[in-house]
Image (cartoon, grey):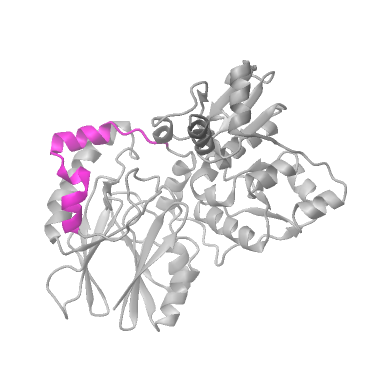
Amino acid sequence: MIVQKVRSEGIAHLSYFIGQGADAAVIDPRRDIDEYLELAARNEMNIKLILETHRNEDYVVGSLELAAATGAKILHGGQQFFKYGGEVKDGQELMVGNLRIKALHTPGHTAESFSYVLYDPSSSSSPIMVFTGDALMVNEVGRTDLMGAEAKERAASDLFDSINNKILPLGPQTIICPAHGAGSVCATQIVEREESTLGIEAMSNPMLRLSRPDFISKKLGESLEISPIFRSMEVWNLEGAKVLGRLPSPQPLSPKEIKHAMVKGAFLLDVRQPYSFAGAHIPGATNLYVDFLPVYSGYVITPDRPIALIAEGHCQLEQAVRYLVRQGYDSFAGYLRVGMDLWSKQGNEIATMDMVTAKDLMAMIKRGDDIIILDVRDKRETAKGGIDEAKILHLGEIQSRLAEVPKNKMIVTYCGSGFRGSCAASLLLRNGYSKVANLHGGYAAWQSYLQSSSR
């Protein structure tokens, strides 16, 4: 028997490869499927079954991609109008080699959410593992706001029942295998530890110690951002995303070809570090560092435009493509060949972006400089504190609320560590703002400066 966890960084997505004998199944596959195929080949197994725990909204599920490559059967809940795959029933049992998988309908996070219980009849009649999707995670439970405000209370009630009446009765020895780890947008309190059992969760998960009224009240009080791309993903994951056949390989473009792509409407995305972008970038480019693409690309890129990439080397380029494809972006105009070196050597126009230190910003505030400080962090971050003089404007709201940001003042953007602040500053520059700076190191640098100054 093999159970292999496959991690997708950025969105902290966890999928699972399960195999026994010559047969294998994959639960919640991502869109770039090469790792599942490699696992199957290495273990001389055939992927026969693909199980979805729920209709995802934070990444494009790779079920159709994997099915096209393997001929595997796709199963998911029937409470949504899926246009692909088949319906799994509550209590239905499936076989992978000699392993038995029992499907449990566990609604709450979404109406059609299912958990899958793994048994090995050769060793025990008790469950070994339960693949809980977004119903139950380590130290957390799933969001209940993705079906709309009007359904939130019902969803919270359903989730309480699913956990307490379906999942926990499987026994304290049962290992939980959730669909997300720490850092996911689908829950805020997931801990770094990925391994847990139902017994550990019953003792340590704060949500599992609440009464039904308190559980529902807690869920109703949650306020989490919803990326604009989530609604597109909802459609793709119901109707079925386009099958790519392989990971896209953007073509290298000369500076002249990059300019032509921009004229034709390509979105110019610079995935380099903020300090690289600040030092030299192509006018009109948006800076979003590669590691932040999985969570924040949906706030700044619309899926209807081809993307022209600027990266530091092929490793960063390939990582950017993987992250973007998982988010549903699969149209690429190409990438800048040789990066900014060739662009500058050919005498093309170069733009820069100011960066200020925490010390610089404090001096501006004390002098009474006419500046606007924009805090572009998420709600859960701003709730813990920020720069007193700042205006809170989430990164995803900048382009829709430009009227609130005057062009005749110096704008200083900041986030937690400087990466999203750079993205925000680049969006302002792209929209005609000329006096823009990013706080180097973000709020972390600001806090460190205040601490060192008080000694």
Look at the image and give the residue range highlighted in magenta. 198-225
Judge left or right: residue 178 versus residue 248.
left
In the image, residue 268 lies at what x, y percent? 68, 45
Judge left or right: residue 33 versus residue 350.
left
In the image, residue 444 lies at what x, y percent? 50, 38
Give the total number of marks visible in the rendering: 0
Check the image and report above or below for 441 versus 333.
Answer: above
Residue 101 appears in the rendering = yes
Q: To which quarter of the image does residue 405 belong?
A: top right
In the image, residue 71 lies at what x, y percent? 42, 73
- Kindly identify the residue that appears in the image at 53 percent across and 41 percent down: 417
Instruction: Characterize the magenta stretch by its predominant secondary structure.
Output: helix
Taking depth in this image into account, of 78 and 228 the one nearest to the observer is 228
Residue 166 is one of the magenta-drawn residues: no
Check the image and report above or below for 187 versus 12.
Answer: above
Name the quarter where the N terminus is drawn. bottom left
Judge left or right: residue 438 versus residue 177.
right
Outermost residue toward the front?
Answer: 455
Residue 267 appears in the rendering = no
Residue 221 is one of the magenta-drawn residues: yes
In the image, residue 50 lies at what x, y percent? 35, 66
Q: To which quarter of the image does residue 362 belong?
A: top right
Judge left or right: residue 212 versus residue 258.
left
- Kindly identify the residue that appears in the image at 63 percent across and 25 percent down: 411
